Image: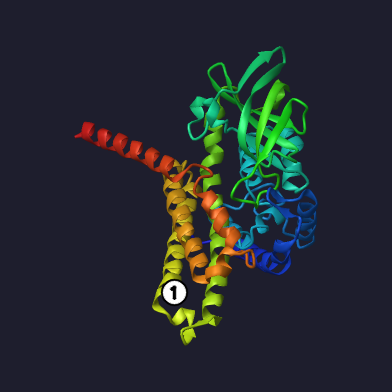
Amino acid sequence: MTNTPTQRARDIAVRAEAFVRETIAPYERDPRCGAHGPSAELVAELRGHARAAGLMTPHILADGSHLDHVETAIVLRAAGLSPLGPVAINVAAPDEGNMFLLGKVATAEQKERFLKPLIAGEARSAFFMTEPADEGGAGSDPSMMQTVARQDGNHWVIDGRKAFITGADGAAVGIIMAKTGHGATLFLVNLPDPAVRIERVLDTIDSSMPGGHSIVAIDGLRVPADQILGEPDQGFRYAQVRLAPARLTHCMRWHGGATRANEIATAYACRRQAFGKPLIDHEGVGFMLAENLIDLKQAELMIDWCAGVLDGGAPGTAESSMTKVAVSEALMRVADRCVQVMGGTGVSGDTIVEQIFREIRAFRIYDGPTEVHKWSLAKKIKRDANAAMQER
């Protein structure tokens, strides 16, 4: 097991970085970037540029194989240098995680129908798991799931409500998790469907993901049995196939964003004069930027360590939890310092720093809040300690 990316990955990352900086970053002030993410028109335009550059879905190769996790890390860090970068080259959440899951679990027929258009960047997808908290539905604890699916001949009928469903507005492919007889099951569906109704798109602190985050009602949705993803009642297990790598790719993308914010803050501190010298020569400012370098490097090393664990064939459940906590908290410190260094400019929309700050603040919650991951790790600590005592 090695944490050294291959030459092929480095080559892709170099091309992706140049593309994001030179072609995609200028779109950051495009009026089609709204409160609920870039518009469908803008997404199509950005992906047109990516296709022309040979960078559409670059982590999935022409033969359908994936870059490994260590290789993917440097590509997604490059993509994340702009909030629009992952959308443009088709490595954004939730599509990236959904493509990974379909590649691991879907049948050949399901891949042709549901995965192929996602890889081509011709369609977006949504993962329907989280439910409204005020109704006691599933959130960080999926065992609380209230959406149900009942079998009706060769079909299943799904009823329930989902919340914070990223990209549901405008998605063509849905993966819906619902309770079945002895667990939960994942269902593949074509969207839009009259039985899947978006009640509202939430106004959230972040604004980088196309379609935003929706409250969705599912009323009598009929799904053929051959659109079950994997085996019935195994949905929680399959969700874990997706969740650990998806946590890590979130870390990769937002590491790129924090790196960009730090570049902007550093340039500002070097040119802005105050009290007779550049800001960076004031110890309070210079030390913040030094701390940013430390946090960014530690976050990079955590990402690469966890990627190596996954590449070694381990589930990486605990490792991805540790990495998600460490990286999201470190990147939040970086983004916060960048805003502080830049003062009034840092809280304005004059640079992308303000948006990156908002996006990373949301990242501390998405794919499991810090506190849930710590709780899960504490449970593992107790299990391991009890097992060790019994062996003595």
Q: Is residue 7 above or below residue 386?
A: below
Q: In which quarter of the image is residue 216?
A: top right
Answer yes or no: is residue 2 visible: no
Q: Where is residue 337 in the image (x, y as percent from the top left)?
A: 47, 65
Taking the view exactly as shown, the residue that stands out farthest to the top is 153
Q: In which quarter of the image is residue 389?
A: top left
Q: Which residue lies under the disc numbered 1?
A: 285
Quadrant including the C terminus: top left
Question: From the viewer's perspective, is 350 left or right of 346?
Answer: right
Q: In this view, does 150 lie above or below 314?
A: above
Q: Residue at x 72, y 67 (%)?
A: 26
Question: From the viewer's perspective, is 129 left or right of 327?
Answer: right
Q: Residue at x 57, y 31 (%)?
A: 132
How does the figure colour the protein chain or chains?
rainbow
Label 1's element? Answer: helix
**Circle 1: is it few (<14), some (14-19), or many (20+) Cα within 10 Å?**
some
Q: Position of residue 94 (x, y in %)?
A: 63, 44
Taking the view exactly as shown, the residue that stands out farthest to the bottom is 276
Q: In this view, does 391 lie above or below 116?
A: above
Q: Position of residue 57 (x, y in %)?
A: 69, 53
Most foreground residue, 382 or 12: 382
Answer yes or no: is residue 135 visible: yes
Q: Quadrant of residue 117?
A: top right
Q: Is residue 294 above or below residue 151?
A: below
Residue type highlighted by circle 1? Val
Q: Which residue is drawn at 75% across and 41% down?
A: 170
Most foreground residue, 47 or 38: 38
Q: Where is residue 347 in the image (x, y as percent from the top left)?
A: 57, 63
Q: What number of labels is visible?
A: 1
